[in-house]
């Protein structure tokens, strides 16, 4: 099962790179325009993804969608 996370980055260049979850194997991130990145992670990796997003200075906010 996978979970989708909507991530608002602090600036456009970080969003275009879309690499905030690169250390999580199997995570997929895509730039969705502006400062928004849509990430898909395995549900088993959701806690690790949340921690990375909370710790990243490049992330302004995030919302777990499903």
Image (cartoon, rainbow, N blue to C red):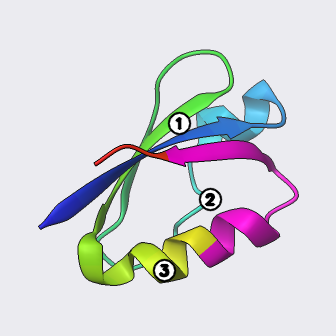
Q: Secondary structure at mark 1?
A: strand
Q: SS class of the residue under badge 2?
A: loop
Query: In the figure, is residue 7 to the left or right of 35?
Result: left
Task: Give the residue number, with chain letter if any, for mark 2.
Answer: 20
Q: Nearer the viewer, residue 35 or 14?
A: 35
Res. 38 image quadrant: top left
User: Which quadrant of the structure image shows residue 65?
Assistant: top left
Give the mark, 3 or 2, whose residue is nearer the N terminus: 2
At horizontal 53% and vertical 44% (from top left) the residue drawn is 63
Q: Are marks 3 and 1 in contact (CB under 8 Å)?
A: no
Mark 3 to mark 1: distance in Å? 18 Å
* Residue pictured at 19% horizontal, 62% vertical: 2
Task: Work out whether mark 3 precedes mark 1 in sequence or the reverse, and give the earlier one.
Answer: 1
Q: Label 3 belongs to which residue? A: 47
Residue named by callout 1: 37
Residue 50 appears anywhere in the view? yes
- Confirm whether the magenta stretch covers residue 35: no
- Report the Cα–Cα distance between label 1 and label 2: 9 Å
Q: Residue furthest left?
A: 1
Report whether 27 appears left or right of 35: left
**For numbered disc 3, what is the local secondary structure?**
helix
Q: Which residues are magenta?
A: 51-63
């Amino acid at each position: 099962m996978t979970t989708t996370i909507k991530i608002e980055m602090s600036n456009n260049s970080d969003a275009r790179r879309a690499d905030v979850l690169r250390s999580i194997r199997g995570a997929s991130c895509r730039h969705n325009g502006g400062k928004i990145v849509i990430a898909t992670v395995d549900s088993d990796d959701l806690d690790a993804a949340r921690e990375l997003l909370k710790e990243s200075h490049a992330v302004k906010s995030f919302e777990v969608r499903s």
